[in-house]
Image: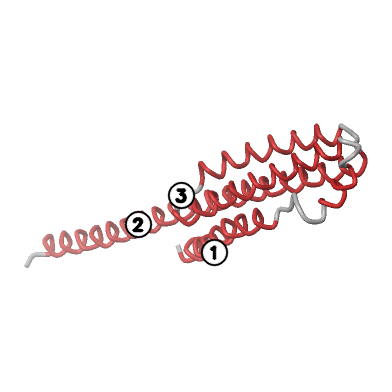
Amino acid sequence: MTIGRKLAGAFASVLVIIAGMCGGLFWTLDNLRDATAAAVESRATIQAGERSLAALVEAQNAVRGFVATRNEDFVKKYKEHGDEYEAALADLNRLASTPAEQANIAALKTAVQVFSEETQVQIANARDPISRDGALASVALTGRLTNARKAMNGILDINNKELVVLTAEQKQA
């Protein structure tokens, strides 16, 4: 074999090695990009969940404030926080991609429906002088967010666990 052929063979070998390294690099970058995109989505889902729960808590506080004081400003706040919840829920619906997340969102909607019905009764009773004492007593027992919190924790747990896995994948890449 001539020197020219040996040099050409060596050069070809170097090119094959470089091409293999580039392929490996592109594969790693593609996996990193996918893990990053999934992590961004998980973080967005967590934020939407936290926003929706915070809006519900503030709505609950507004109802309690109204029942205690009969100040109509609290009813306005209740409605504003209800709108904030609906906006966050729309984001959550858009971002939820697994059947488990959808099941938790369905449970959340059911719990919030019960919460809304109970708080509407509390507001109506607080406005009625005859029923006002009953409204005050009902605050401890109804209009609670226990089931909404359980459903939301299911969504947050799924996404927090996914985020841990995705973060580990990003570190490996």
Amino acid under disc 3: Ser
Near-viewer residue (67 or 86): 67
Find residue 140 and report its horizontal and vertical position in percent. 82, 56
Disc 3 packing (10 Å; few <14; some 14–19; many ≥20):
few
Mark 1 vs mark 3: give the one in front.
Answer: 3
Disc 1 packing (10 Å; few <14; some 14–19; many ≥20):
few
Q: Earlier in the sequence, mark 2 or mark 3?
A: 2
Q: Earlier in the sequence, mark 1 or mark 3?
A: 3
Mark 1 lies on a secondary structure that is helix
Say if mark 1 contacts mark 3, CB within 8 Å. Answer: no
Near-viewer residue (120 or 134): 134
Marks 1/2: CA–CA distance = 25 Å
Q: Quadrant of the C terminus?
A: bottom left
Mark 3 lies on a secondary structure that is loop
Mark 2 lies on a secondary structure that is helix
Say if mark 1 contacts mark 2, CB within 8 Å. Answer: no
Amino acid under disc 1: Lys
The residue sitting at 21% across, 59% down in the picture is 11
Looking at the image, residue 107 sits to the left or right of residue 74; the answer is: left
- For label 2, the residue is 27
Q: Quadrant of residue 84?
A: top right
Marks 1/3: CA–CA distance = 15 Å
- For label 3, the residue is 97
Marks 2/3: CA–CA distance = 25 Å
- For label 1, the residue is 161
Colour mode? secondary structure
Q: Quadrant of residue 72?
A: top right
The residue sitting at 54% across, 54% down in the picture is 104
